[in-house]
Image (spheres, rainbow, N blue to C red):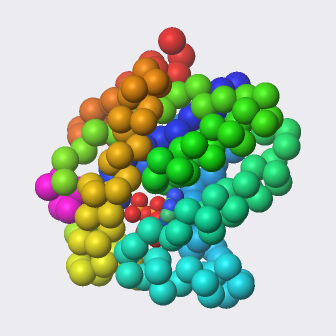
């Protein structure tokens, strides 16, 4: 089994596609957004530290995020493959991830970017806001998250591209068609 990074802006469909990929391939799912939400919901010391940052829509500092990710990896020593969702979001995170994989005699085998325009993600998240009630989906915070993606996280793409590790999958259309296109990359 291989390790996969699923990459894309907020609202790109990473969560939806992750669920389907886990079902089909049995990946251990690591979503840093879900982990941070779990910590804030359960009011853990980490949750207390990141609550305000998350609610503002800003990125949590690398040091905190990378430490949490490492802990999650250590909890799953026998995982056959990881699906990273929402991580890495900065180049230092991407470098740390490579190091962790290397230390486990493994690697990131696939980086799949879901390509969805800024206009489309705004429409999708506006819809999601009416059904999911996430604290960070309010308009101002949402703007911040989208800006964080298009100013900071986007720089992770050339990092992987320059190493010929990036595959872009068109992220607009039927969920199943997008899923099949991701599977084609994994099954090659
Ligand atoms: P989105 O729907 O914006 O993709 P996520 O559910 O992945 O959001 O993450 C929610 C929030 O958690 C982010 O806005 C950020 O504050 C924090 N977060 C999640 N992953 C990371 C990360 N890799 N680095 C820094 N902050 C993160």
Q: Which residues are drawn in magenta?
A: 119-123
Q: Is residue 151 above or below residue 187?
A: below
Name the one closer to the observer, 139 or 87. 87
Image coordinates for residue 168, horizontal then vertical, percent: 34, 30
| Circle count | 0
Residue located at (18% from left, 61% from top): 123
Image coordinates for residue 133, horizontal then vertical, percent: 39, 79
Q: Is residue 120 magenta?
A: yes
Instruction: Please identify the residue farthest to the top as the structure is shown.
Output: 188
Image quarter in which the N terminus is found: top right
Residue located at (66% from left, 29% from top): 107
**Residue 129 vs residue 164: left or right?**
left
Q: Is residue 61 above or below residue 151?
A: below
Residue located at (75% from left, 50% from top): 73
Query: Would you say residue 97 is visible in this rendering?
Result: yes
**Residue 153 vs residue 22: left or right?**
left
Image coordinates for residue 47, horizontal then vertical, percent: 63, 81
Residue located at (51% from left, 12% from top): 188
Q: Is residue 42 above or below residue 22?
A: below
* Quarter residue 143 falls in: bottom left
Q: Please identify the dominant SS of the magenta region.
A: helix
Q: Is residue 89 magenta?
A: no
Query: Would you say residue 23 is visible in this rendering?
Result: no
Instruction: Please identify the residue farthest to the left as the structure is shown.
Output: 119
Name the one closer to the observer, 120 or 45. 45
Name the one closer to the observer, 128 or 104. 104
* Quarter residue 97 falls in: top right
């Amino acid at each position: 089994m291989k390790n996969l990074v699923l990459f894309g802006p907020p609202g790109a469909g990473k969560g939806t596609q992750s669920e389907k990929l886990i079902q089909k391939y049995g990946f251990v799912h690591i979503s840093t957004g879900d982990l941070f939400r779990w910590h804030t919901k359960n009011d853990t010391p980490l949750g207390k530290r990141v609550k305000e940052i998350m609610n503002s829509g800003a990125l949590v500092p690398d040091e905190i995020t990378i430490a949490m990710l490492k802990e999650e990896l250590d909890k799953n020593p026998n995982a056959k493959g990881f699906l990273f969702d929402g991580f890495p979001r900065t180049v230092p995170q991407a470098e740390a991830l490579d190091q962790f994989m290397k230390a486990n005699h493994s690697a990131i085998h696939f980086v799949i970017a879901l390509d969805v325009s800024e206009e489309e993600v705004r429409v999708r998240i506006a819809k999601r806001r009416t059904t999911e009630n996430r604290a960070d989906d309010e308009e101002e915070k949402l703007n911040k998250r989208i800006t964080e993606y298009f100013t900071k996280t986007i720089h992770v793409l050339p990092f992987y591209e320059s190493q010929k590790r990036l595959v872009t999958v068109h992220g607009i259309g039927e969920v199943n068609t997008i899923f099949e296109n991701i599977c084609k990359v994994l099954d090659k």
